Amino acid sequence: MPPRAAWQSALLWLAGAVIIIGLVGFTGVITLPDRQTGTVGDLSASDPQVVWHKWDSLWYERIAVHGYGYQLEDIKGQAAAGYFPLYPMLVGLILRVAPGFSFFWTGAMLSTLSTLAALALIAGWLSENATAARRALFVTLTSAGAFYLVIPYTEGLFLLLVALTMVLTRRRQYVWAGACCGLAAVTRVHGLALIAVPIAACLLDPRLEPRVRRQRAGAALVLFAIPFGIYLAYMAHIQGTASAFLARQAFWGNAKPYPFRAIVGLVEHPTWPSGWLHGGFWVLSVGALWRYRRAMTPGELLFCAGALLISTQQEIFQGIYRYVTPLLPLALAVAADTSPMRRRIVVFNLVFATLMILAFVTRNRLAV
């Protein structure tokens, strides 16, 4: 699809998704009780900030405005280290340049523009033709966690970095793809798995001599490590330990995270419905990954598998539906599947999305 047509298509699809998401959220706020206040039918619900500025968005605002060194004597000040820095620091930079802007609208705009750019890359660079592009946009925007792409969360920025990595890798610009992976790794912890995309492609590229493959893969790894190294040094300086992200997980009920911790959590907390609901979504995602394993390159497969593995280090399964949303190789594989299977996956995601949006806007922990 030509660049101009890709941007136009991405804009139309995203605008339609934003309208539908907004209507579902608004309906939830005015018809269902807020779990925190107990109120129903809040007349201020016409303000998007009332509907969507909740949960992690509040933590990103804290980091954007005050940084990671704010009130460290308080548990909240230390717990902020549980969030990665690129997104809130970008919003914070904008707020410093334009102090009259609000965090919510600045963060939402950054997320939405990032998503728009990612969708344009999907349509223009990662899809074979216009039909495939429309299917890919549809699958991406009907993902259960797609509403996070347009609110002050990291998902939109992360999706853009995944798309950029895939485009650069397909163009055999492995070193620059490694740099994008480094930025993704300081956006979400799942970004650590993204480096598999350019590294695997580079090492398996038959058009390059073995020596050149090793050199370019090494350079990509260096550029990947630089942002993450800066992040670790910064946390060591501000929070007192380079491993602050892991050390502060105790404040979030997950003192010793390890792979498949969430599966153990199902046994420890068998009566928590959120664990089983999100755990079921994780199982279905793993099943989809197995189904589409041959439709992906080795690096893309490793990225998706690694991200799904990282998502199990929590006390229980939570937020899996939003962690899966930026797994672009998986979305592209679904888009290329047969119509009946694609419809079943889309319908499942739409039902789950509606449930999660209603839970999110009413502050029900089921959404977290």
Image (tube, rainbow, N blue to C red):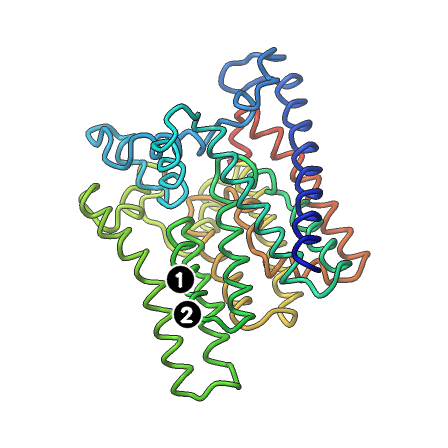
Residue at the image position 65 percent from the left and 69 percent from the top: 295
Residue at the image position 53 percent from the left and 35 percent from the top: 151
Eyeballing the image, is 34 above or below 63?
A: above
Q: Which residue is mark 2?
A: 175
Q: Residues within 10 Å of mark 2 (few under 14, many from 20)?
A: many
What's the distance in space between the residues labelled 2 and 1, CA to CA? 7 Å
Residue at the image position 44 percent from the left and 61 percent from the top: 193
Q: Is residue 312 left or right of residue 43?
A: left
Outermost residue on the right side: it is 340
Residue at the image position 63 percent from the left and 43 percent from the top: 144
CB of mark 2 within 8 Å of CB of mark 1?
Answer: yes
Q: Position of residue 27 (x, y in %)?
A: 68, 22
Query: How many numbered markers are drawn?
Result: 2
Eyeballing the image, is 153 above or below 62?
A: below
Q: Position of residue 319 (x, y in %)?
A: 52, 42
Q: Name the one closer to the observer, 129 or 277.
A: 129
Q: Quadrant of the N terminus?
A: bottom right
Figure quadrant of residue 85: top left
Q: Residues within 10 Å of mark 1 (few under 14, many from 20)?
A: many
Eyeballing the image, is 336 above or below 84?
A: below
Q: Position of residue 47 (x, y in %)?
A: 57, 19
Q: Position of residue 167 (x, y in %)?
A: 55, 64
Q: What amino acid does circle 2 point to?
A: Val
Q: Name the one closer to the observer, 181 or 129.
A: 129
Q: Which residue is mark 1?
A: 179
What label sits on residue 131 in the rendered view?
Answer: none
Figure quadrant of residue 336: bottom right
Q: Is residue 210 left or right of residue 145?
A: left
SS of the residue under disc 1: helix
Q: What amino acid does circle 1 point to?
A: Ala
Outermost residue on the front side: it is 4
SS of the residue under disc 2: helix
